[in-house]
Image: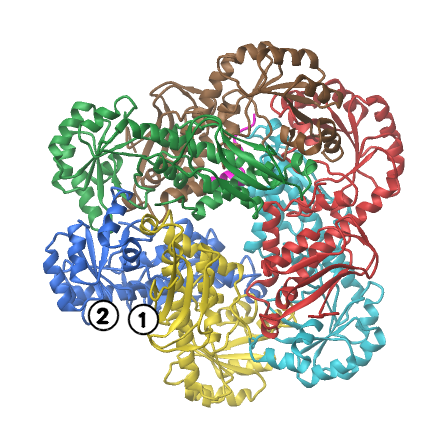
Chain colours: A brown, B green, C red, D cyan, E blue, F yellow
Amino acid sequence: MRGLVMTAGVRRLVDLALEEDIGSGDITTDALVASEARARAVIVAKEPLVVAGLDLARYVFQRLDPDLRFEPTLSDGDAAAKGMDVVVLNGRQAALLTAERTALNFLQRLSGIATQARAYSALLGKSATRLVDTRKTTPGWRVLEKYAVRVGGAANHRMGLFDGVLIKDNHIAASGGITAAVTRIRATVSHLTKIEVEAATLDQVREALAVGVEVIMLDNMDLPAIEAATALIAGRALVEVSGGVTAQNLKALAAAGVDLISVGALTHSARAVDLSMNIGERVKF
Amino acid sequence: MRGLVMTAGVRRLVDLALEEDIGSGDITTDALVASEARARAVIVAKEPLVVAGLDLARYVFQRLDPDLRFEPTLSDGDAAAKGMDVVVLNGRQAALLTAERTALNFLQRLSGIATQARAYSALLGKSATRLVDTRKTTPGWRVLEKYAVRVGGAANHRMGLFDGVLIKDNHIAASGGITAAVTRIRATVSHLTKIEVEAATLDQVREALAVGVEVIMLDNMDLPAIEAATALIAGRALVEVSGGVTAQNLKALAAAGVDLISVGALTHSARAVDLSMNIGERVKF
Amino acid sequence: MRGLVMTAGVRRLVDLALEEDIGSGDITTDALVASEARARAVIVAKEPLVVAGLDLARYVFQRLDPDLRFEPTLSDGDAAAKGMDVVVLNGRQAALLTAERTALNFLQRLSGIATQARAYSALLGKSATRLVDTRKTTPGWRVLEKYAVRVGGAANHRMGLFDGVLIKDNHIAASGGITAAVTRIRATVSHLTKIEVEAATLDQVREALAVGVEVIMLDNMDLPAIEAATALIAGRALVEVSGGVTAQNLKALAAAGVDLISVGALTHSARAVDLSMNIGERVKF
Amino acid sequence: MRGLVMTAGVRRLVDLALEEDIGSGDITTDALVASEARARAVIVAKEPLVVAGLDLARYVFQRLDPDLRFEPTLSDGDAAAKGMDVVVLNGRQAALLTAERTALNFLQRLSGIATQARAYSALLGKSATRLVDTRKTTPGWRVLEKYAVRVGGAANHRMGLFDGVLIKDNHIAASGGITAAVTRIRATVSHLTKIEVEAATLDQVREALAVGVEVIMLDNMDLPAIEAATALIAGRALVEVSGGVTAQNLKALAAAGVDLISVGALTHSARAVDLSMNIGERVKF
Amino acid sequence: MRGLVMTAGVRRLVDLALEEDIGSGDITTDALVASEARARAVIVAKEPLVVAGLDLARYVFQRLDPDLRFEPTLSDGDAAAKGMDVVVLNGRQAALLTAERTALNFLQRLSGIATQARAYSALLGKSATRLVDTRKTTPGWRVLEKYAVRVGGAANHRMGLFDGVLIKDNHIAASGGITAAVTRIRATVSHLTKIEVEAATLDQVREALAVGVEVIMLDNMDLPAIEAATALIAGRALVEVSGGVTAQNLKALAAAGVDLISVGALTHSARAVDLSMNIGERVKF
Amino acid sequence: MRGLVMTAGVRRLVDLALEEDIGSGDITTDALVASEARARAVIVAKEPLVVAGLDLARYVFQRLDPDLRFEPTLSDGDAAAKGMDVVVLNGRQAALLTAERTALNFLQRLSGIATQARAYSALLGKSATRLVDTRKTTPGWRVLEKYAVRVGGAANHRMGLFDGVLIKDNHIAASGGITAAVTRIRATVSHLTKIEVEAATLDQVREALAVGVEVIMLDNMDLPAIEAATALIAGRALVEVSGGVTAQNLKALAAAGVDLISVGALTHSARAVDLSMNIGERVKF
C-alpha cells in the first residue's frame, strides 16, 4: 500500500538533477523548438524489467511543464516485456525533450533495482526468511532506492542512523563490550526501537542473548557457523545474516532458518535497465 | 591537472546524503561514544581497484569534524591492490562512525566507475579514438561521475544540455530536417560551441556534411555502416559512434577510424567496488 | 552521553532566527558600535533553573563572530541558582549585541523545558515508570525540545512519524480494526521497529494483545480503567498512559505499574525561564 | 485589515516543521492508508480560546494535499467556545493524518498567544495605553507570534533589529552616553524611523528629553518612579514601560498615563491551548 | 525562437528580490488594502524603449498572486513608443502594490539593456560582424542580461567559465606560453568546445595560429594592428576584437573584417529605462 | 561607523553569482593551473573612482580560497586615482583566476554607485538638505547598493516595504483619501515608525498636514509648487521632493528649503567604473 514517498529530500534531489543537466539552458532545444509546440511521447521498455519510479518520473516532467499529462499503462511493481509501452505523455515538446534524460536516468536506475530485487526474491521462493537491503545506497537516493527494493519484493532494513539501533564491532570496542553497550543504550533509546547487535563469534552471540537483545546480526560467518548460531539462539532473538551473500548461497542460508538476509548489492551494484522515450511517434491530435 | 571540482551542486549532494542518513541523529553512536573521544581509522581496498573521489570523502568527514585529519596514501587514479590501505584518518570517533557509510558509499561508487573506465580504456590500447561518456549518469552525480570517468582514463562528452549542441532525431523532426535545424541553431549559438548532429543513415550523414556540421554521431549503426560513413566523411567532421558498444566490439570500432566512441555503461552500470573502514586498528596515541 | 545534535534542521532554524531578527541590519548597533570593538559579557540566571542549550547558544554567537570565546561555567543539566553566572563570553561587541536576544530566546526556552521536566521527574522519585514527551513540540524545534526533555531527566517518545509505529484511532478506523491494521503493518515495517497501538477500551486492549503488539497506549482512561488494563496486559506488552496526566496524578499513575507516562505539556506549555546578558561588566583587558 | 503575512521565512519554517516530523516517511500512515482514500475531518476547540493561525494551518495541510478543502467556521480573532468546530477539512486521508500534528502544533501555540493577549488587553479596558510585545519570541516564529499578538488585541513593538532604533544600556555605554549615541544615530538613520532610548533614572530621562528623542523606555522602574518620569516628560516624548509588568499591576501602570506597556510574557510564556482533530466523524460523501 | 530561460538561478534571484523588499511585511499595503480587493493595472512605457523581460515580470507578480492575469500587448523585442501600454494586469490589489517595484526594477533594467543593444546593433547595419557581450554582467543576473542582449539583436559570448575555453594572458603566463596552454587543454576539453586565445601582439597571433586555435581574441589593439592581425589570420580562425570598443569606432572595426566585437558596456553600464505602473486606471469590472 | 552588512541575502547573492559563472567548472583554469600553485595579484583603478565593496570582494575570493590574503590599500569611501593599486591579494592562483570576474563585477558596480553619489552630494555643498536613494535598486542588491550610496555620502530612504510607511497615490485611492488612510494606519503601525504621504497638489498637502503626518513627499511638482508647498508646511512635517530631479536642478531644489531629495538614478542608472586585476605582476616569493 505504501507508494513512493516524495520527501523533501527527494524533491531536492530532483531539483539538483535538473539543474546539473539544464544549467544555464538547453541550448539545442531552446534554439529549435517553439515554446508553444506540443507533442506526444511514449516511454518504452527495451528489455524485460520490473517498473519502479513512475511517480518520480511524472514529477520530473511536471517540474518543467505542470500541465503535462503523464499516463502510465503499468504500475510500479508490474513486469514489462521488451517493447512494451510503459508511459504515454502529452505536453510541451520542449519540456519533453529537456526532461527526457533526467527522467529516464531516474526510471532506469530504480527499475534496475526493482528488477534485480525481484530476481533475488524469486530465489527465496516461499521461504519465511526476509531478504533486506542495507545502507549501501547511492548517496542522495536512500528513500528512492529503498522504495525500489520494496517494489521488487524485498524488504528494508533501517532507513538510516536515526530509526534503528545497530551496534557494530566498532561500537562494541568503543563501549567496552556488548553487555556494556546494550545496557547503556537501553537506558536512552525509545521504547519503540529494538536493539540489534553484530556478532562475529558464538561467544558474542551468547553475550548478546544474555543481555537480551532483540536482533543478532551474524557478520560474515560461514554456513556451519550460521547454523550453529541459529540453533544456539533458538528463537530468543531474530537472526540476520550479513556479508558474503550471493545469488548462489541465498537459498542455503534461508534453509538454515535465519530470519533476515541482508544484501548490499541490492542497491549498490544494480545495473540500469534499458528504457527509452520516443517523441512524436503515432501522434494523433 | 584537473582535480575534482567541488561545485555548489556537489556540496548540496553531500549535505543531502548526510541528512538522509543521519536525520534526527545517529542514535547508536550518540548513546555509546563520548563526544570528546578520538580515534584513528584506515580505509582499505578489499579488491583491486582504481581510486577516485578522495577529496570528496575528505569533505564528507570534515562536514562532521572540521579538524579531522584525512591522509591518503594514494592519489585519485592510482591503482590499489587488495588489502592496501588507501586513507588514514584521525579525528573524533563519533564523526568517524557517523560519516563512515556515506563517505564509503561515495568512494565505492566513484572508484567503481574509475576502475571500469580504466578497463575499457585498456581495450583501446594506443588507438587515437577517444572513449567518452554520456549523459546517462546518476541524477545528482553528473560532475562526480564524469570526474571518475576522467580518472579512469576515458574522456567526457558534454557536461549537460548547456555546454554543447547535439541535434538528435527528435530535434530534427521538430525542425523539419537537418539542414533547417543546423541553419537555425548556427544563428544563435555561441561562436565557441561546435554543432553535432545525430545521423542514422548515410543520407543523413551526407546532409550533415553539406550543411557543415563539426561532429556527426552515427547512431546505432552496425560496423559496415560505420565504416562506410567514416569513409564518406573523410575527415570533414569528427565521427562519434553511439549505441551498441560493448567491451567486445570496442576495438573493432576504433579500428574503423572513428574519432569518438560513447558508452553509457561507463556511468550507468558500473559496479561499486569494495572498500571498508577499520576504526581503532593499530591506534597508538 | 548523548549531547545536543546540531542536525541540518537545527542549523537551518538558527539561520532563520538570525535572519528574522537582523533582516537588513541591526540599525542601532551598526550606527553606534565600532566593528573592531571587543567586549566581555556574562549570561546570568535570574531565577533558579536547569540549564539546557549551551552548545546552541554558542553556535548562535559564533555565526556572527566565529572567533568569539564562549565559556560556560556549568554544563547542560546542571542547576543554576538565582544570580549565578552561566556563561562568560569574549568577542566582538557588535556580535554580542546583535546576537544577544536570539541566543537568549533559545536558551530561555530550552532551559525552561529542562527545568519543568526536572520538576516532573522528581515527582516520580525512584519509580521504574518512564516519563516521556510527545510530538506536541514547537514546529521547527523537535530535536531541540526533545533534547531539553532528556536534559531534564525525562525520556523521549519517537522523534517523528518516521522512527516508530503508533496506530491511533483514526488509523484503526481507516484499516478496519486493530487486527487488520497490525497484520498489515507487520508485513512492511522494519524488523527493528516495535508496534504500538492506542486503546480506549479493555476490548481494544484484548484485541491488541491477541495480535501481539509490543506496546499498548491507554488513551484517556481513568485510573481504575488503567489499573484494570495493566492487570490484563500483565507484562505481555509495554503499557503507556496518555491524556489527562497532571503533576497531581502522576505518582498514582506510576503506582499503577504502567511502563510509560506521556505528557504533552513537557514541551508545549513550558514557561521560558529568565536569563539575561550583561555586557562590559567587570571587563578587564 | 492586516492578515497573516506568509513571508518567505514563514514558508521555510513550515517546511522545516514538516520535514522534522515526516523525515523519511510516515511509516504508520503509509502502511495503512490507501493513497487515494479521502476523508472529512473537523478541528475542534477543547477549551475556550481565541483562534489565530487559520491561514497557516491551511498552508500546512495544502503542502501535502494541494487540493484539500479547508473551510473555517470562524476567523482569526474570533472566540471559540469549548467543543466548537473551528475548521472543516476534506481531502486525502493520508494527508490529513500526516499533517495533523504539525498543523495543530502551529494552531495551538498561536491561538494560545492570542487568547492570552486578549486576556491582558481586557485588563486595560478602554485605556489609551497600548499593550505591546517584545523581541522575546520563539526563534523562527517572530512574524507568526507578533501576528497572534495583534489578533489578540495587543500591538507590536518593532519587528526586529532592522525596523526601529532602540538604544539600550549597553549601547549607551558603548557610545559614551545618551547624547552622544542619539546624535550619532540621527545622522545615519532613515527619516522615517523614530529613536527610542532606554532610561533607568530620571537623570537619563532628562538627558534623553534634552537631545530630543521621540520615545523613552522606562526600564524596570517602580510605580512612583514611573509616575515621576511621566510627569517630567509631559508629552514631549512617548513613554514606554518595560520590565516587571504583571497582570496585577497592568491597570495601575496604565493609570499612570504611560503610552506603551511592553510585556515579554505575551510571547515567551504563553500556554498552548487545546485543539484536536477528528477524522471521519459525520462523513457523508 | 529562444525565449527567456527561467533557470533555477533566476527563480532564486526573484525570491531574493522579493524577500529583500518585503522582509517581514509590506506594512503600508497590509494596513490599507483589503486582502480580497482586486484591481486592474497597466504598465506604461514612459520613454521609447525595446521591451525585455515580460515573462520575468509575470513570474514576479504571480509569486504573490498565482491567479493574477498578466496580459502583454507587446512581446519581448518589440519597440514601445512613449506612453504606450505594455502590459495589462488584473489581480489582487495588494499583490499588485507589493510586487510593483520589484517587477518594474527587473523590467526597467532588462529593457534598458535591450534598448541599448538595439542601438549598438543598428550601428553595424548589415555587417556580417557579430556584436557580442562579455561576462561583465551584474552578479546574479547572468542569464537574464544575456537574454536581454539577444532580445536587442546582439549575440552572446560564452555563458560562463563552464561552456567555452578562453585562454587569457594570466592563463598563458601560468602555462608557459600559448603553445603549451593550447596543447594541454586540447587533451582534456570536450570535442564540442572550440578554443579561443587572447593575443596582444602579432607574434602571439602567429603562435596561436600555428597551434591551431579556432578563435583569436585581439585584446586592446588599435585599428591598424587589428587590420594587420586580421590579414595575417586570413580566415584560419575566427577573429574577436575586445577592449576599447565604443559606439564611435564600432563601424570601423567591423569594416576591418573581424568576426566578433565584444562590448562589456552592453551589460555593465546600461541605463534603466522608464516604465511605470498605474493601478485602477480605466478599471471596469 | 556602519560598514557593509553581510546579511544572509547578500551571502546568497554571492553564491548565486559564483554558481552562475562557474557552473560545472572553470574548464580553462582547471586544465591549465595546478591546484597547489599560488600567486600574487593586484586590483587596480583604471579611472578615478570612489571605492565601495571591499569586504564583499574579499568574501567572494575567500569562498574559493578561505586562506587567501586580501589586503586593501584603501578603505570604502576613499577616492582612488587612475592607476592606483586598491587591493593586494595572495592566494591560490586558480582561485584568483576563477573568482576574478565575479569579484570585479561586484566592485565595479558598487564603486560606480559610490562615485556617482559622491558627485551628486558635492552639488549640494553644505546644504542641510539630505540626498536620499529610492527602492529603484537592482533586484537582489538592495542592501549592497544602499550601502554604496552611503559610502558616496548620500543617505538612505527606507530599506524596503517593511521598515517605513509610505502612502502613495494608489494607497490613497484604495483607502478613500489621505485622512482615512492615515487614520487607519496609525492604529496598527509601530510607535517607532513615522508616516509619510505622497502629495501631488497643495490640497493634498493641506489634508496631510491636518491629519498630522510626519513626512510629506511632493511628487513630481515643479519648483514654484515645491516652494509653495514648503512654505505651507512651514516645518510642521519633513518635506521630501521626488521625481524630475537632475544634477541640474538639485541645487535649486535644496535652496527651496526641502528636507529630502530622492533620486532613483543614484542606484538604477549608475555606470560601472573600471577596475582590473593583474596576476603575477611584481610577484616575489
- The residue type indicated by label 1 comes to Glu
- Using residue C229 as the reference point, say whether residue D1 is left or right of it: left
Distance from Cα at disc 2 to Cα at disc 1? 24 Å
- Using residue E121 as the reference point, say whether residue D99 is left or right of it: right
Q: Residue at x 28, y 29 (%)?
A: A281
- C-beta proximity under 8 Å, tags 2 and 1: no
Q: The residue marked by circle 2 belongs to what chain?
A: E
Q: Report which residue position mark 2 lands on.
A: E246
Q: The residue marked by circle 1 belongs to what chain?
A: E
Q: Quadrant of residue E240?
A: bottom left
Q: Is residue F270 visible?
A: yes
Rendered location of residue F194, percent (x, y): 60, 75
Q: Quadrant of residue E234?
A: bottom left
Regarding mark 1 in the picture, which secondary structure is present there?
Answer: loop
The span shown in magenta is: A1-13
Regarding mark 2 in the picture, which secondary structure is present there?
Answer: loop
Q: Report which residue position mark 1 lands on.
A: E47
Give the mark, 2 or 1, whose residue is nearer the N terminus: 1
